[in-house]
Image (spheres, rainbow, N blue to C red):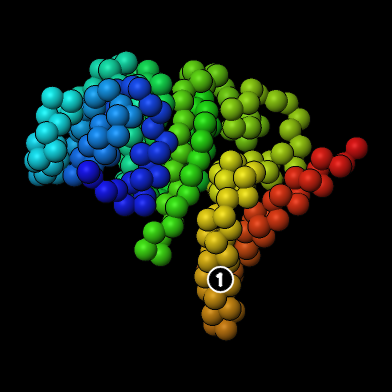
Amino acid sequence: MIKLSKRLEAVASLVSSGGILADVGTDHGYIPIALMERGRILRAIATDIGRGPLARAAEHIAQCGMQEYIETRLSDGVAALAPGEADSVVIAGMGGGLVIHILTEGETVCRAARELILQPQSELERVRIFLREQGYVTDAEELVAEDGKYYPMMRVHSAGLPAAGKDSSECAAGEPHKAGISQEDVRRRRLWDRYGRQLLEEGHPVLRAYLQKERMISEGILQNLRRQEPTEQIAERIRELEEDLRQNGEAMAYDRMEKADCKTP
């Protein structure tokens, strides 16, 4: 039986049962192998842009006797997939910019899937904003810590193409266009984009640990900058860090803020 790392185990846990999986950038092929071994999926397509990683995946698939159920394909993103061919599409372990590129270039395939499991390694806020603006709905979020690093991930599905002229500054995640949105809604949505709505609303314990680490790092950098000879560049960086710390504090107090909002007449 394949033993997955904590990160990959969390990614695999977001895949719904009973469908066909496409694992984009499969590398060693561990996720499709593990899910087949557990009887969670019917079959899988493991893709990678590199011939070397794909050969490693094929070797592991053969060692586990899964050749009949897991097909390997050389593919740039989802280019080798047909729309509707996969129920679940995993895009994990790559930068946020590349995740957005794959979703954009392979839009037809991604929107046809029942669900997308995304685990960007960077630019989480940018990815969340992109998903919201493009009409994707977040079904579930997870966050794990492994070897001193934090790995956020999400399961989303397409709710349809974004409305023409849709302004992301005035539309909440998964909500239609609203005129006259309040500053409180804007503040809350910025926190959702940065830290994840479900993680905040659940008071996820790993998110709290991440926020504490983020605050400690930002405060250390801020103290160091304030000891330096002031320049415009340093002043701008200080303002950025102060804003980061403000949002961090709001995220730490999110549950209390939500309760206070509910009491407001």
Q: Say which quarter of the image contains residue 197.
A: top right
Q: Residue at x 23, y 45 (%)?
A: 2
Q: Is residue 192 visible?
A: no
Q: Say which quarter of the image contains residue 168.
A: top right
The residue carrying mark 1 is 216
SS at badge 1: helix
Q: Position of residue 155 (x, y in %)?
A: 45, 34
Disc 1 packing (10 Å; few <14; some 14–19; many ≥20): few
Q: Position of residue 158 (x, y in %)?
A: 46, 23
Task: Determine whether 262 is above or below 207 in the image.
Answer: above
Q: Residue at x 38, y 26 (%)?
A: 17
Nearest the eye: 240 or 107: 107
Q: Say which quarter of the image contains residue 218.
A: bottom right
Q: Is residue 117 visible?
A: yes
**Horizontal relation, residue 179 to residue 6: left or right:** right
Amino acid tagged 1: Met
Q: Residue at x 70, y 56 (%)?
A: 253
Q: Residue at x 76, y 49 (%)?
A: 257
Nearest the eye: 141 or 249: 141
Q: Position of residue 238 (x, y in %)?
A: 59, 69
Nearest the eye: 207 or 233: 207
Q: Position of residue 236 (x, y in %)?
A: 57, 65
Quadrant the N terminus occupies: top left
**Horizontal relation, residue 143 to residue 181: left or right:** left
